[in-house]
């Protein structure tokens, strides 16, 4: 099975639509995983992309000079230790973690605390973020191994704050790549218990990134109806030249028609129009 790996997902952190909403649902955030048009739009004022990693803390910039810039013990670097845990990342919201990466994940737990909660939103062995055994980190195009690196692209949004800590035995090497939205943006606080609509949106994104636009068209040809988040699939279909007629939350695939194309250009094949 051919896969289109979401290599553009890191770039998503740098871009956003100029008409972006000030309130983003979890389905809106999932939609960014396949929004290639956003790559051509400049980031909004106040929007940034950053990364916490395990780089060698001996490397630093002090008083206008690079100090120990060739230091290469990049596996165990942390922000600080607190009691028996290591602090990997700390950020202010509103924001979203777009990518978690490691070269060596083991059984020590990594916990993600969101919006000042006393209990972590995610508490898994570090390997549990990448082995596709723990929902919602189960989708092959979003959670996969590439060039011996383990990747997790399931969005983890937060409104006020995010803190990532690790217990002993977690492994070596980590990246937490995150986007900070402009002040005033409202995003949901991530929870692993997703709604049926949110789960369906992740499934659509996973299949799209695995098979590309052809999957959308073949689905239209082969299926009669399915239940998906209507706004999300409408955006995917229209982005790839397929008009849609949608009843809220129910997509009647018999109603889709290919959009007209300029003379000489090949039209999408989506079956007979009604």
Image: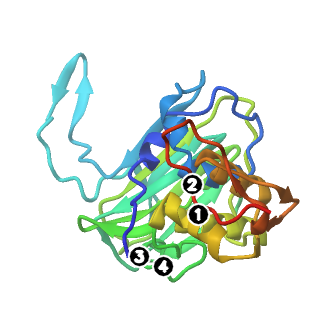
Q: Give the distance between the C-alpha atoms of the residues marked 1 and 3, in whole angstroms.
A: 35 Å
Q: Quadrant of the C terminus?
A: bottom right
Q: Locate residue 225 relative to residue 128 in the image: left or right.
A: right
Q: Which mark is residue 255?
A: none
Of discs 1 and 3, which sits in the foreground?
A: 1
Q: Secondary structure at mark 1?
A: helix
Name the residue tied to disc 1. Answer: 217
The picture places residue 203, in percent across and down from the top left corner, at 61, 70
Residue reaching furthest to the right: 247
Residue 239, position as x, y percentages in the image:
61, 45
Residue at (83% x, 58% y) in the render: 246
User: Residue 27, located in which quarter of the rendered image?
Assistant: bottom right
N-term mark: 4 or 1: 4
Query: In the rendered structure, which disc, 1 or 3, sits on the residue that comes first in sequence?
Result: 3
Report the residue that reaches farthest toward the front. 263
- Alpha carbon distance from label 4 to label 1: 27 Å
Name the residue that disc number 2 marks: 268
Image coords of residue 40 (percent x, y): 49, 30
**Disc 4 designates what residue?**
132
Who's the residue at 35% across and 58% down the image? 174
Query: Upstream in the sequence, badge 4 or badge 3?
Result: 3
Q: Which mark is residue 127?
A: 3
Q: Residues within 10 Å of mark 4 (few under 14, many from 20)?
A: some
Q: CA distance from mark 2 to mark 4?
A: 34 Å
Q: Which of the two marks, 4 or 1, is nearer to us in this view?
A: 1
Residue 92 rendering spot, x and y as whole percentages:
61, 39
How far apart in space, not on screen, are marks 3 and 2 (Cα)? 42 Å
Instruction: Tell me if residue 47 comes above or below residue 63 in the rendering.
Output: below
């Amino acid at each position: 099975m051919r896969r289109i790996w979401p290599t553009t997902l890191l770039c998503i952190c740098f871009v956003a639509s100029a008409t972006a909403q000030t309130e983003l649902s979890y389905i809106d955030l999932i939609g960014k995983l396949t929004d290639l048009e956003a790559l051509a739009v400049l980031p909004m004022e106040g929007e940034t992309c950053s990364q916490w990693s395990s780089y060698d803390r001996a490397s630093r910039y002090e008083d206008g000079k690079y100090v120990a810039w060739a230091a290469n013990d990049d596996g165990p670097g942390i922000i600080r230790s607190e009691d028996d845990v290591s602090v990997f990342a700390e950020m202010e919201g509103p924001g979203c973690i777009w990518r978690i990466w490691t070269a060596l994940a083991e059984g020590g737990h990594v916990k993600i605390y969101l919006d000042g909660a006393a209990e972590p939103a995610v508490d898994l062995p570090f390997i549990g973020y990448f082995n596709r055994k723990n929902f919602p980190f189960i989708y092959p195009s979003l959670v996969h191994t590439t060039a011996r690196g383990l990747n997790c692209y399931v969005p983890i949004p937060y409104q006020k704050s995010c803190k990532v800590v690790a217990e002993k035995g977690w492994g070596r090497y980590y990246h937490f790549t995150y986007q900070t939205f402009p002040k005033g943006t409202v995003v949901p606080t991530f929870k692993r218990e997703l709604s049926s609509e949110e789960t369906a949106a992740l499934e659509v994104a996973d299949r799209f990134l695995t098979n590309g636009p052809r999957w959308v068209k073949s689905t239209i040809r082969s299926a009669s109806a399915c239940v998906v988040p209507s706004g999300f699939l409408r955006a995917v279909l229209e982005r790839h030249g397929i008009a849609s007629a949608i009843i809220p939350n129910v997509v009647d695939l018999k109603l889709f028609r290919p959009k007209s194309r300029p003379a000489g250009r090949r039209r999408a094949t989506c079956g007979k129009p009604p």
